Image (cartoon, rainbow, N blue to C red):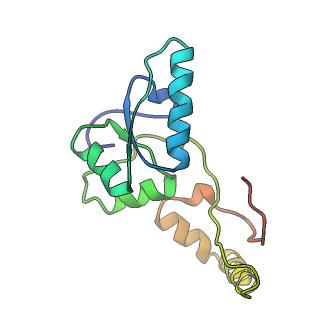
Amino acid sequence: MKAGSGESFNGLASLCGHTVSVEDGTTEQSDAQTQAKACTTAGKKTVTILSFGNQSQANLAVSSGRAQVGFADSQVAAYIVATSDGVFSNSGTAFEVAPYGFAFPKGNGMAGPVEAAVNHLISNGVYKQILTKWGVQAGAVTTASINDATS
Protein backbone atom coordinates (compact mmCIF):
# COMPACT_ATOMS: atom_id res chain seq x y z
CA MET A 1 0.00 0.00 0.00
CA LYS A 2 1.04 3.61 -0.24
CA ALA A 3 3.04 4.51 2.86
CA GLY A 4 1.08 6.46 5.44
CA SER A 5 -2.35 5.51 4.11
CA GLY A 6 -3.40 4.03 7.45
CA GLU A 7 -5.04 1.01 5.78
CA SER A 8 -4.56 -2.51 7.09
CA PHE A 9 -5.18 -5.69 5.13
CA ASN A 10 -4.94 -9.03 6.91
CA GLY A 11 -6.53 -11.89 5.02
CA LEU A 12 -8.41 -12.03 1.77
CA ALA A 13 -11.71 -11.00 3.41
CA SER A 14 -10.15 -7.64 4.30
CA LEU A 15 -10.09 -6.80 0.57
CA CYS A 16 -13.91 -6.51 0.43
CA GLY A 17 -14.93 -2.98 -0.52
CA HIS A 18 -11.44 -1.97 -1.66
CA THR A 19 -9.69 -1.44 -4.98
CA VAL A 20 -6.79 -3.83 -5.54
CA SER A 21 -4.09 -3.74 -8.22
CA VAL A 22 -2.63 -7.01 -9.47
CA GLU A 23 -0.40 -8.22 -12.26
CA ASP A 24 -2.18 -10.16 -15.04
CA GLY A 25 -1.87 -13.93 -14.92
CA THR A 26 -0.79 -14.19 -11.28
CA THR A 27 -2.14 -16.20 -8.40
CA GLU A 28 -3.01 -12.88 -6.80
CA GLN A 29 -5.27 -12.00 -9.72
CA SER A 30 -7.22 -15.26 -9.43
CA ASP A 31 -7.30 -15.01 -5.62
CA ALA A 32 -8.69 -11.46 -5.85
CA GLN A 33 -11.32 -12.59 -8.36
CA THR A 34 -12.36 -15.47 -6.10
CA GLN A 35 -12.49 -13.14 -3.11
CA ALA A 36 -14.60 -10.60 -5.03
CA LYS A 37 -17.21 -13.32 -5.55
CA ALA A 38 -16.98 -14.36 -1.89
CA CYS A 39 -17.52 -10.76 -0.77
CA THR A 40 -20.62 -10.43 -2.95
CA THR A 41 -21.98 -13.81 -1.78
CA ALA A 42 -21.51 -12.69 1.84
CA GLY A 43 -23.46 -9.49 1.14
CA LYS A 44 -20.38 -7.28 1.42
CA LYS A 45 -19.02 -4.78 -1.07
CA THR A 46 -17.03 -6.49 -3.81
CA VAL A 47 -13.31 -6.20 -4.50
CA THR A 48 -12.62 -3.88 -7.42
CA ILE A 49 -9.72 -5.43 -9.31
CA LEU A 50 -7.39 -3.44 -11.55
CA SER A 51 -5.24 -5.83 -13.60
CA PHE A 52 -2.02 -4.74 -15.29
CA GLY A 53 0.46 -6.24 -17.73
CA ASN A 54 3.38 -5.93 -15.33
CA GLN A 55 4.12 -5.30 -11.67
CA SER A 56 5.43 -1.77 -12.27
CA GLN A 57 2.03 -0.74 -13.67
CA ALA A 58 0.27 -2.36 -10.72
CA ASN A 59 2.57 -0.46 -8.34
CA LEU A 60 1.83 2.82 -10.13
CA ALA A 61 -1.89 2.27 -9.57
CA VAL A 62 -1.22 2.20 -5.82
CA SER A 63 1.24 5.10 -5.71
CA SER A 64 -1.10 7.27 -7.80
CA GLY A 65 -4.12 6.47 -5.60
CA ARG A 66 -6.09 4.51 -8.22
CA ALA A 67 -5.87 1.40 -6.00
CA GLN A 68 -5.79 1.22 -2.22
CA VAL A 69 -3.60 -1.86 -2.13
CA GLY A 70 -1.38 -3.88 -4.43
CA PHE A 71 -1.56 -7.63 -4.12
CA ALA A 72 1.69 -9.54 -4.83
CA ASP A 73 3.70 -12.48 -3.51
CA SER A 74 5.09 -11.66 -0.08
CA GLN A 75 8.66 -11.89 -1.40
CA VAL A 76 7.85 -9.51 -4.25
CA ALA A 77 5.96 -7.14 -1.94
CA ALA A 78 8.89 -7.06 0.50
CA TYR A 79 11.25 -6.18 -2.36
CA ILE A 80 8.91 -3.46 -3.66
CA VAL A 81 8.71 -1.89 -0.20
CA ALA A 82 12.47 -2.19 0.42
CA THR A 83 13.36 -0.48 -2.86
CA SER A 84 10.57 2.14 -2.97
CA ASP A 85 12.36 4.93 -1.09
CA GLY A 86 9.49 5.06 1.40
CA VAL A 87 6.69 5.23 -1.19
CA PHE A 88 5.19 1.86 -0.18
CA SER A 89 4.71 -0.09 3.03
CA ASN A 90 3.39 -3.57 3.74
CA SER A 91 -0.18 -3.33 4.95
CA GLY A 92 -0.35 -6.37 7.19
CA THR A 93 0.68 -9.99 7.32
CA ALA A 94 1.02 -12.23 4.28
CA PHE A 95 -2.30 -13.84 3.40
CA GLU A 96 -0.65 -17.17 2.60
CA VAL A 97 2.98 -18.18 2.34
CA ALA A 98 4.39 -20.81 -0.01
CA PRO A 99 7.99 -21.68 -0.83
CA TYR A 100 9.61 -20.74 -4.11
CA GLY A 101 11.65 -23.12 -6.25
CA PHE A 102 14.05 -23.36 -9.13
CA ALA A 103 13.12 -24.74 -12.54
CA PHE A 104 15.61 -26.42 -14.87
CA PRO A 105 15.19 -28.18 -18.20
CA LYS A 106 14.91 -31.95 -17.72
CA GLY A 107 18.20 -33.76 -17.95
CA ASN A 108 20.50 -30.73 -17.91
CA GLY A 109 22.29 -31.93 -14.75
CA MET A 110 21.73 -28.78 -12.65
CA ALA A 111 19.00 -30.00 -10.28
CA GLY A 112 21.27 -32.13 -8.08
CA PRO A 113 24.07 -29.56 -7.65
CA VAL A 114 21.58 -26.75 -6.90
CA GLU A 115 19.75 -28.96 -4.40
CA ALA A 116 23.09 -29.69 -2.67
CA ALA A 117 24.07 -26.00 -2.68
CA VAL A 118 20.75 -24.88 -1.17
CA ASN A 119 20.95 -27.59 1.49
CA HIS A 120 24.48 -26.40 2.29
CA LEU A 121 23.18 -22.82 2.69
CA ILE A 122 20.40 -24.11 4.94
CA SER A 123 22.81 -26.10 7.12
CA ASN A 124 25.31 -23.25 7.59
CA GLY A 125 22.65 -20.62 8.33
CA VAL A 126 23.26 -18.42 5.27
CA TYR A 127 19.86 -19.33 3.77
CA LYS A 128 18.09 -18.00 6.88
CA GLN A 129 20.24 -14.84 6.87
CA ILE A 130 19.33 -14.12 3.24
CA LEU A 131 15.61 -14.66 3.81
CA THR A 132 15.67 -12.59 7.00
CA LYS A 133 17.47 -9.72 5.22
CA TRP A 134 14.56 -9.52 2.75
CA GLY A 135 11.83 -10.21 5.31
CA VAL A 136 10.64 -13.41 3.65
CA GLN A 137 11.69 -16.01 6.20
CA ALA A 138 8.07 -17.19 6.60
CA GLY A 139 8.40 -19.02 3.26
CA ALA A 140 11.56 -20.89 4.28
CA VAL A 141 11.97 -24.60 3.73
CA THR A 142 13.96 -26.84 6.06
CA THR A 143 15.33 -29.04 3.29
CA ALA A 144 15.71 -28.52 -0.45
CA SER A 145 14.41 -31.38 -2.58
CA ILE A 146 13.86 -32.17 -6.24
CA ASN A 147 10.36 -32.39 -7.75
CA ASP A 148 8.65 -31.55 -4.48
CA ALA A 149 6.17 -28.91 -5.71
CA THR A 150 3.30 -28.20 -3.35
CA SER A 151 0.86 -26.95 -5.96
Residue 11: tell me if it is visible: no
Number of on-image labels: 0
- Residue shown at 57% from the left, 23% from the top: 38
**In the depicted view, which residue is nearer to us: 25 or 80?**
25
Quarter of the picture holding the N terminus: top left
Placement of 40 over or under 143, stated as above or below: above
| Residue visible at 76% across and 84% down in the picture | 107
When the figure is inspected, residue 88 is found, relative to residue 65, above or below; the finding is below
Residue occupying the point 50% across, 52% down: 74
Which percent across, then down, holds residue 116?
Answer: 74, 83
Q: Closest to the observer: 24 or 139?
A: 24
Q: In which image quadrant can residue 17 be found?
A: top left
Q: Left or right of 112: which side holds 54?
A: left
Residue 101, percent from left and from top: 65, 67
Task: Specify whether 104 is left or right of 33.
Answer: right
**Picture coordinates of residue 30 (x, y %)?**
55, 40
Most extreme residue toward the top is 43
Residue 22 found in image quarter:
top left
* Residue 99 percent coordinates (x, y): 64, 59
The residue nearer to you, when weighing 117 against 17, is 17
Q: Is residue 141 above or below residue 19?
A: below
The structure residue drawn at horizontal position 41% and vertical position 61%, both measured from the top left corner, is: 79
Q: Residue furthest left?
A: 64
Q: Is residue 124 visible?
A: yes
